[in-house]
Amino acid sequence: MEAAYDLGGSLVYAALWVVLGHVFSGEVEVMLEWLGRQRAPLLIVPAAVLAIVGYRLWQRRHHGTARADELCGPSEPERNRILR
């Protein structure tokens, strides 16, 4: 029964994107033409990179750096000590 829900959800999701693409295709073409005339990509790409780097730096400051022991679990010697 779960597979039927997955299939139904996938069909609805795909249909939604097809309908949105059909409805907004004209606006997308206009925007792409405008971007071609402008130098916007020269500003958008670096701004996106800066936003991603800034977000990652904020995450690191807020949550601290990732440590291997937290990501991988205990090391082999520590695991042996725990099991004894």
Image: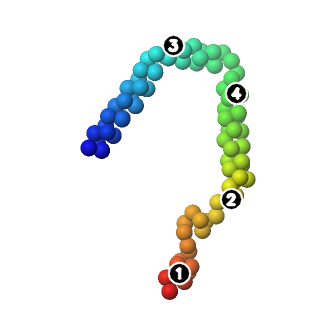
In this rendering, which labeled residue sits more in front, label 3 or label 1?
1
Query: Of the residues under marks 1 and 2, which one precedes in the sequence?
Result: 2
Q: Residue 41's x, y, as percent? A: 66, 26
In this rendering, which labeled residue sits more in front, label 1 or label 2?
1
Callout 2 touching callout 3 (CB < 8 Å): no
Residue under label 3: 26
Tell me what residue is drawn at x 71 percent, y 48 percent: 58
Residue under label 4: 42
**Crowding at mark 1 (Cα within 10 Å: few <14, some 14-19, many 20+):** few
Residue situated furthest bottom in the rendering: 84
Task: Name which residue type carries label 3.
Answer: Gly
Callout 3 touching callout 1 (CB < 8 Å): no
Residue under label 2: 65
Task: Name which residue type carries label 2.
Answer: Thr
43 or 73: which is nearer to us? Answer: 73
In this rendering, which labeled residue sits more in front, label 4 or label 2?
2
Query: Of the residues under marks 4 and 1, which one precedes in the sequence?
Result: 4
Residue under label 1: 82
Tell me what residue is drawn at x 68 percent, y 59 percent: 65
Query: Of the residues under marks 3 and 1, which one precedes in the sequence?
Result: 3
Tell me what residue is drawn at x 50 percent, y 17 percent: 24
Q: Secondary structure at mark 4?
A: helix
